[in-house]
Image (cartoon, grey):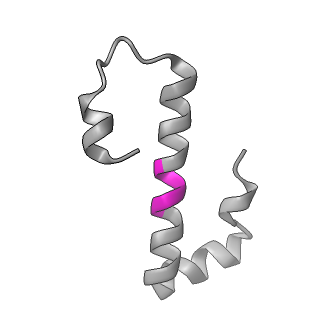
Amino acid sequence: MTYEEVLALPPYDVAREKKQALLKEGLLYLTEYHQAHCTPYARMMQTVGFTPHHVR
């Protein structure tokens, strides 16, 4: 779902589960993007043992 599509959703009509799924999707995208484009961030994530696949 694009940013524009999320903003077009009626805020009080979206179920909690849907909001959580959208947030998770967005945060995973940002995490993967930053890991791929920022060496210090990728190194930090590797040091703490985090991979996006660990997120449920």
In front here: 37 or 6?
A: 6
Marks counted in the figure total: 0
Instruction: From the top left corner, tell me how far across and down residue 27 is, in percent.
Output: 49, 52
Q: Quadrant of the N terminus?
A: top left
Give the residue drawn at x 24%, y 30%: 8
Give the residue drawn at x 46%, y 71%: 33
Instruction: From the top left corner, tell me how far across and down residue 24 is, in percent.
Output: 55, 44
Overall secondary structure of the magenta section = helix
Instruction: From the top left corner, tell me how far across and down residue 48 is, in percent.
Output: 70, 70
Q: Is residue 37 above or below residue 6?
A: below
Give the residue drawn at x 58%, y 23%: 17
Q: Quadrant of the C terminus?
A: top right
Q: Reply yes or no: does residue 27 show up in magenta.
A: yes
| Residue 9: quarter of image | top left
Q: Is residue 10 left or right of 43 when viewed as pictured?
A: left
In front here: 36 or 2?
A: 2
Q: Is residue 32 above or below residue 16?
A: below
Give the residue drawn at x 50%, y 80%: 36
Q: Magenta residues? A: 26-30
